[in-house]
């Protein structure tokens, strides 16, 4: 088993626990042990874009120090950290880049980092779980499938921060294929639709939920019209805006046809035959289980 | 009693005083003529009333301490923070659920935490404040309760927090939730209460009540001491 | 042509790290932006205002509904990260003790329902 440092992020421990549970189960099947640092803090998403900001980089860099400590102690096999939440991924990766590319801010971050046993070296590599899977090879993922998701039409929803800004994503921004490859490795059919990268409304969901409802409506409608049975995503905020927020969509669009939204690792857990507890569908709203049962992919 | 300690200079709210160098800040201020009407309590490092900020001579660092515990140093610039303005949200413990998002619901400003660790820096009790704030943010009530156990609500963390969080209120809610809902009842306490109700100690108490002062004193001095 | 307020323009360019003078108003950023229906000025218009040193850009609704999705950054043919410029404009207002969203406005039920990620990112982008 390869031991890989794993950074969950706050939401993965609460509203998105199903994302975490399904990932840990699938990783184990693929020979990866996810090692969570004993102490970690909220990454403080979203990445701060001001060129003079130091304060907002303390939180992400502190987490990278945790990973470095794990590596130095021999608890993991590499100086890499894998994360599931697309927003945490973007925040950690970009702060890492600021640290390594801006020597003035690097010094200030170090001076203000109270109180750590080591100074961050800048050498941790931030990865998203999809990158780890791609690196391993989709064949390996396919080998682990015992319950191929035949007949299931899945629309990959990338959202924003998994692919953007240009060059800081897991795949090409114009023609990404990583999520389609993952879906197909599980035996399902990937449905391409025009709004797979359109922003879900992000943090505006807190105080402008009608706007998010409009965006979610557009995205889900497009996916459904393209023939999708369900959406997969890699971000808890996207999942919230496209899933539980569907109640707001229904208020504004009474003829809206609801389709379920799940985390990609939940489908992986299902395809790997790891059981209902690992796939953790009970936490999803709307409930994907009736659809999956209709397709014969889930037992009664 | 003679005091042979070296005399040091301290500045209290800007005013210069010369005091013996082996006194605590609190004793030194009283030596200099201050009378505490606020900002003093148990004098034993337990109540959190005497929160104090100070700077040392020649250093830019802002430090926090309890006046009743910290010994003065030459050149100390002292200011007291006897009260920290913070609204404790009202909640009825019986109606709360120990869910992951409960603490966040009552203190949503937890989401603003920058993980800068200034609170930990300010804490006179060596508590890992940022860690229990972070644990509260992600709904780990047990961790938040355990890490904040030594907190005496002195307020130094809240005064310095750039995100305007009041950590001690958060910790208090975490401990209350933990004790009521997660930790479970203390069996040894329940057992003892039962024994009392069954009258196990009635005889002994009656005996003590009927003793005179001399007999009581003797009984006290020859009591069985429990060795640690 | 001299910008109306050179200090303002310079400060925005400094904070964002972007050279707004490269923009030739093609409008690609606006066409890809998911939030235009909520905006008073289109993103390309905001860039134009910064080029001209017009401080009214700070009073727009546009900068507050931006979701930093970086669609604009990806599309700009001159490589301007428009999202960075939006952030710089927000910072100039926020650093003057202004909060766009207050947690006090939300009801306890709303807070309970929202995942941490939503509240954390919302506060990070829109408050001082």
Image (spheres, rainbow, N blue to C red):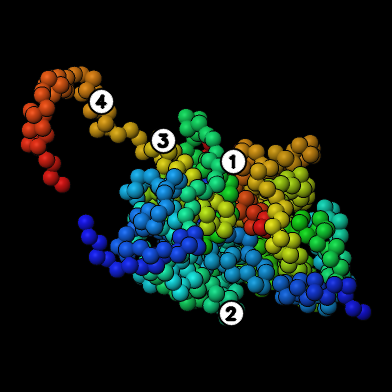
Q: Give the residue drawn at x 73%, y 75%.
A: C14
SS class, disc 4: helix
Q: Share a chain, discs 4 and 2?
A: no
SS class, disc 1: helix
Q: CA distance from mark 4 to mark 2?
A: 64 Å
Residue to which mark 1 is pinned: C112
Above or below, comparing residue A119 to residue A158 in the picture: below
Q: Image quarter for residue A165?
A: bottom right
Q: Give the residue drawn at x 49%, y 40%.
A: B99
Q: CA distance from mark 3 to mark 2?
A: 49 Å
* Mark nearer the viewer, 4 or 3: 4
SS class, disc 3: helix
Residue to which mark 2 is pinned: A104
The quarter of the image holding the N terminus of chain C is: bottom right
Q: Share a chain, discs 2 and 1?
A: no
Label 4 packing within 10 angstroms: few (<14), some (14-19), many (20+)? few
Q: CA distance from mark 3 to mark 1?
A: 19 Å
Q: Nearer the viewer, residue A287 or B70?
A: B70
Q: CA distance from mark 1 to mark 4?
A: 39 Å
Q: Image quarter for residue C59?
A: bottom right
């Amino acid at each position: 088993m390869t031991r890989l440092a794993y950074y969950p992020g706050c939401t993965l421990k609460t509203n998105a626990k199903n994302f975490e549970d399904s990932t840990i189960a699938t990783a184990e099947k693929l020979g990866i042990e996810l090692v969570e640092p004993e102490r970690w803090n909220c990454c403080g998403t979203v990445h701060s874009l001001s060129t003079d900001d130091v304060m907002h980089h303390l939180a992400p860099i502190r987490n990278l120090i945790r990973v470095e400590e794990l590596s130095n102690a021999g608890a993991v096999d590499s100086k890499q950290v894998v994360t599931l939440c697309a927003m945490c991924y973007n925040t950690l990766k970009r702060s890492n880049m600021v640290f390594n590319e801006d020597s003035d801010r690097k010094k200030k971050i170090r001076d203000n980092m109270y109180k750590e046993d080591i100074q961050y070296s800048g050498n941790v590599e931030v990865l998203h779980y999809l990158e780890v899977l791609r690196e391993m090879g989709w064949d390996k993922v396919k080998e682990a499938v015992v319950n191929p998701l035949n007949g299931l039409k899945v629309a990959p929803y990338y959202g924003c921060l998994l692919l953007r800004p240009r060059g800081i994503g897991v795949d090409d921004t114009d023609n990404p294929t990583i999520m389609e490859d993952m879906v197909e490795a599980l035996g399902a059919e990937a449905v391409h639709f025009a709004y797979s990268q359109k922003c879900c409304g992000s943090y505006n969901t807190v105080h402008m939920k009608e706007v998010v409802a409009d965006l979610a409506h557009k995205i889900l409608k497009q996916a459904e019209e393209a023939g999708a049975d369900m959406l997969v995503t890699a971000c808890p905020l996207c999942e919230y805006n496209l899933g539980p927020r569907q109640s707001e969509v229904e208020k504004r669009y009474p003829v809206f046809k609801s389709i379920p939204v799940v985390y990609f690792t939940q489908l992986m857990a299902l395809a790997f035959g790891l059981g209902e507890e690992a796939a953790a569908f009970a936490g999803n709203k709307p409930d994907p289980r009736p659809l999956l049962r209709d397709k014969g992919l889930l037992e009664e | 009693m003679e005091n042979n300690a070296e005399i040091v200079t301290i500045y209290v709210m800007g005013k210069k005083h010369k005091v013996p160098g082996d006194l605590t800040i609190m004793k030194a201020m009283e030596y200099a003529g201050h009378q505490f009407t606020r900002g003093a309590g148990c004098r034993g490092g337990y109540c959190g009333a005497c929160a104090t900020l100070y700077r040392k001579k020649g250093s830019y660092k802002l430090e926090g301490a309890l006046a009743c515990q910290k010994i003065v140093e030459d050149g100390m610039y002292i200011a007291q923070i006897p009260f920290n303005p913070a609204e404790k949200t009202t909640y009825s413990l019986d109606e709360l659920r120990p869910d992951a998002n409960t603490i966040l619901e009552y203190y949503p400003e937890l989401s603003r935490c920058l993980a800068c660790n200034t609170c930990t820096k300010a804490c006179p009790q060596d508590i890992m404040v940022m860690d229990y704030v972070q644990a509260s943010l992600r709904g780990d009530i047990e961790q938040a309760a355990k890490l904040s156990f030594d907190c005496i609500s002195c307020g130094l963390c809240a005064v310095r927090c750039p995100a305007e969080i009041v950590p001690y209120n958060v910790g208090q809610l975490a401990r209350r939730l933990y004790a009521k809902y997660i930790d479970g009842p203390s069996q040894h306490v329940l057992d003892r209460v039962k024994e009392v109700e069954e009258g196990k100690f009635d005889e002994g108490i009656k005996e003590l009540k009927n003793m005179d002062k001399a007999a009581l004193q003797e009984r006290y001095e020859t009591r069985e001491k429990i060795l640690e | 042509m001299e910008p109306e307020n050179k200090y303002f323009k310079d400060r925005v360019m400094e904070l964002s790290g972007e050279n707004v003078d490269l923009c030739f108003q093609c409008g690609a950023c606006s066409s890809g932006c998911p939030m235009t229906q909520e905006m008073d000025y289109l993103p390309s218009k905001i860039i134009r205002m910064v080029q001209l040193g017009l401080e009214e850009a700070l009073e727009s609704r546009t900068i507050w509904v931006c979701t930093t999705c970086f669609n604009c950054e990806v599309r700009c043919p001159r490589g301007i990260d428009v999202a960075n410029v939006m952030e710089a404009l927000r910072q100039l207002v926020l650093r003057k003790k202004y909060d766009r969203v207050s947690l006090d406005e939300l009801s306890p039920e709303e807070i309970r329902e929202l995942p941490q990620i939503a509240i954390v990112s919302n506060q990070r982008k829109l408050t001082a």
